[in-house]
Each structure stands twice: as C-alpha cells, then as structure tokens.
C-alpha cells in the first residue's frame, strides 16, 4: 500500500519561499513519475509540476522560473522549491505518484498561504 505524506506548507509573505516535501512509503518509488498539483478555494485542482522517472521535468506556465521540482530516490521523496511566492499561489498542494499505464496515488495535501 502506497502512502504519500506532504509537509512544508505554511504561511509566508509575498516574495518569500517554501519547500514542500512528499515522502512515499512502499517500494518502487524510482519507477514512478511524481507530481505536484494545487487546488485553491472554489477552483479545480490544477497541474503545477511533474518529474519523470529519469528526472525530466514539466511546469505550469504560471510557476516556470519560480518553482523547482526535484526527487531523491534514495529517500523516496519529491520536493517542490517555491520561490517568489505570490498571493495567487495560495492553495492546498497535493503530491501525486503515477505510472502510465498504472495506478495513481495522491497525498492528503498541505496548505500554502501567501499573504500580500
């Protein structure tokens, strides 16, 4: 059974930084793609960034140049470094673990609040 546990969220002023972590239990972490998604109040969940098995990355246009996704397969952990945070980045951030084709797993989310 795979479990994903996010951490690192919090309250930060605009322009500040946070680093989110997502620790995965179970084996075969390196075989999965990993991603971060977010959901703001009243809005649908949206893509933020993904990192493939071999380290290829993709970002939403809204976070390019500000956010960096990375992974440490030895620690079964994926990170999201967020710099230059804006109030519109306020959301619950979710970690996703996926294979294509194959199962998809989600974490419970961590709240990020950016004050202006």
Image (tube, grey):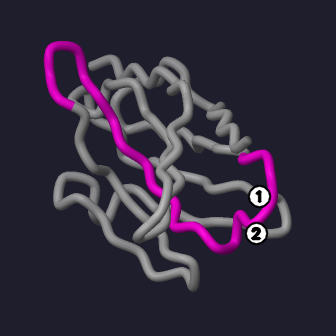
Query: Which residue: 65% across, 44% down?
Result: 21
Q: Quadrant of residue 75?
A: bottom right
Q: Which residue is mark 2?
A: 73
Q: Is residue 25 above or below residue 13?
A: below
Query: Which residue: 69% across, 72% down?
Result: 30
Q: Position of residue 16 (x, y in %)?
A: 45, 37
Q: Do residues under tags 2 and 1 come within 8 Å of each other at their CB atoms?
A: yes
Disc 1 is placed on an element classified as loop
Q: Is residue 115 above or below residue 83?
A: above
Q: Nearer the viewer, residue 50 or 33?
A: 33
Q: Which residues are magenta?
A: 24-44
Q: Quadrant of residue 50?
A: bottom left
Q: Is residue 31 above or below residue 12?
A: below
Disc 2 is placed on an element classified as helix
Residue neighbourhood size for the residue with mark 2, other residues' Cα within 10 Å, grouped as few (<14), some (14–19), many (≥20): some
In magenta segment, residue 30: yes
Image position of 6 (left or right of 91): right
How far apart are the two marked residues, 2 and 1, measured between alpha carbons? 5 Å
Residue 76, label in figure: 1
Q: Position of residue 22 (x, y in %)?
A: 64, 44
Query: Which residue: 57% across, 85% down?
Result: 54
Image position of 44 (left or right of 55): left
Residue neighbourhood size for the residue with mark 1, other residues' Cα within 10 Å, grouped as few (<14), some (14–19), many (≥20): some
In magenta segment, residue 56: no
């Amino acid at each position: 059974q795979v479990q994903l546990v996010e951490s690192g969220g919090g309250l930060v002023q605009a322009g500040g930084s946070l680093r989110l972590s997502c620790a995965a239990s179970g084996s075969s972490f390196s075989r999965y793609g990993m991603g971060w998604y977010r959901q703001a109040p009243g809005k649908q969940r949206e893509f933020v960034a993904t990192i493939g098995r071999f380290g290829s990355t993709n970002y939403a246009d809204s976070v390019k140049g500000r956010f960096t996704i990375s992974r440490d397969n030895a620690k079964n952990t994926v990170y999201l470094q967020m710099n230059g945070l804006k109030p519109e980045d306020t959301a619950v951030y979710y970690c996703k673990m996926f294979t294509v084709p194959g199962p998809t797993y989600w974490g419970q989310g961590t709240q990020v609040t950016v004050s202006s």
